[in-house]
Image: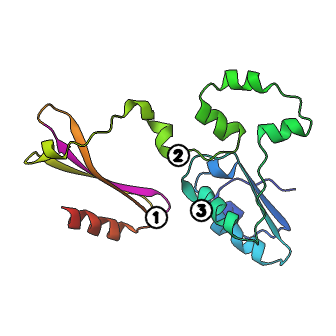
């Protein structure tokens, strides 16, 4: 077994029967790492790629590969939760784990192999209040916000209206993935 860093330059040129990527969802530059090891796998028709990881949200190249693998019979997807491990004989106190990890979404992701929404990772849904304020928006100043993204990440365009009482109303939110920078710039220009 040869252990290598997740540096794409250091991964090129090796031949291997099996390539294993541990905690693949957390590998920085995962897409570039996969591109670097692809030639290693194509040299041997029996070569195998093993991606093992705790989920890290519904984003990134690992999540995309996982979703594709679920629909592709060429891939084998195996999920082992804390409950599976316990049923197979792992001596673990799940209640103790839950006390160390009291957030149910974090516990679900870390121990139940659940890909949690990116949204819930940053903002507690209970802090949001949903109302139809479209009538209050008439004639009010509008703001367009755009978060530029790499092609593997979500880009987000948000249309905000500044209300009289200082609050902001999200009139529209549009998320896309896979757009090159030039196309993202065109979308902003069209929205402006």
Residue 121 in the magenta stretch? The answer is no
Q: Which element type, helix, strand or loop, lies under badge 2? A: loop
Number of the front mark, 1 or 2: 2
State the residue lying farthest toward the right: 89
State the residue lying farthest toward the left: 139
Disc on the earlier residue, 1 or 3: 3
Q: In percent of the image, x 19 and y 47: which residue is there?
A: 134
Q: Which residue is mark 2?
A: 117
Between 44 and 163, the residue placed more toward the observer is 163
Q: Which element type, helix, strand or loop, lies under badge 1? A: loop
Query: 37 above or below 116?
Result: below
Magenta-colored span: 151-163
Count of numbered badges drawn on the protein: 3
Q: Which residue is mark 3?
A: 31
Disc on the earlier residue, 1 or 2: 2
Q: Which residue is mark 1?
A: 151
Residue 8 appears in the rendering: no
In x, y percent, where is residue 125? 44, 35
Using a 10 Å C-alpha cutoff, classify the residue at mark 1 as few (fewer than 14 neighbours), some (14 to 19) or many (20 or more): some
Q: Which element type, helix, strand or loop, lies under badge 3? A: helix
Question: Whole-Å distance between the Cαs marked 3 and 2?
Answer: 20 Å
Between 7 and 48, the residue placed more toward the observer is 48
**Pointer 1 and pointer 3: residues touching (CB < 8 Å)?**
no
Residue 156 in the magenta stretch? The answer is yes
Residue 160 appears in the rendering: yes
Disc on the earlier residue, 3 or 2: 3
Q: Please state if 33 lies on the left or on the right of 159 as rendered.
A: right
Q: Main secondary structure of the magenta part?
A: strand
In x, y percent, where is residue 121? 51, 38
Q: In percent of the image, x 77 and y 27: which residue is there?
A: 94
In x, y percent, where is residue 91? 89, 29
Q: In percent of the image, x 64 and y 40: which residue is there?
A: 109
């Amino acid at each position: 077994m040869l252990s290598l860093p997740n540096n794409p330059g250091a991964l090129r040129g090796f031949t291997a029967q099996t390539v294993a990527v541990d905690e693949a969802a957390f590998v920085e530059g995962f897409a570039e790492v996969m591109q670097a090891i692809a030639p290693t796998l194509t040299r041997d028709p029996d070569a195998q790629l093993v991606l093992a990881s705790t989920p890290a949200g519904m984003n990134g190249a690992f999540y995309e590969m996982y979703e594709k693998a679920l629909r592709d019979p060429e891939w084998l997807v195996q999920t082992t939760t804390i409950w599976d491990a316990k049923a197979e004989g792992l001596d673990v106190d799940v209640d103790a784990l839950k006390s160390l990890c009291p957030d149910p979404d974090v516990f679900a992701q870390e121990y139940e192999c659940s890909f949690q929404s990116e949204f819930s990772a940053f903002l507690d849904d209970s802090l949001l209040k949903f109302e139809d304020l479209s009538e209050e928006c008439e004639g009010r100043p509008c703001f367009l916000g755009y978060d530029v993204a790499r092609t593997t990440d979500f880009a987000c365009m948000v249309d905000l209206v500044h209300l009289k009482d200082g609050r902001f109303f999200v009139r529209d939110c549009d998320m896309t993935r896979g757009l090159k920078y030039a196309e993202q710039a065109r979308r902003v220009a069209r929205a402006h």
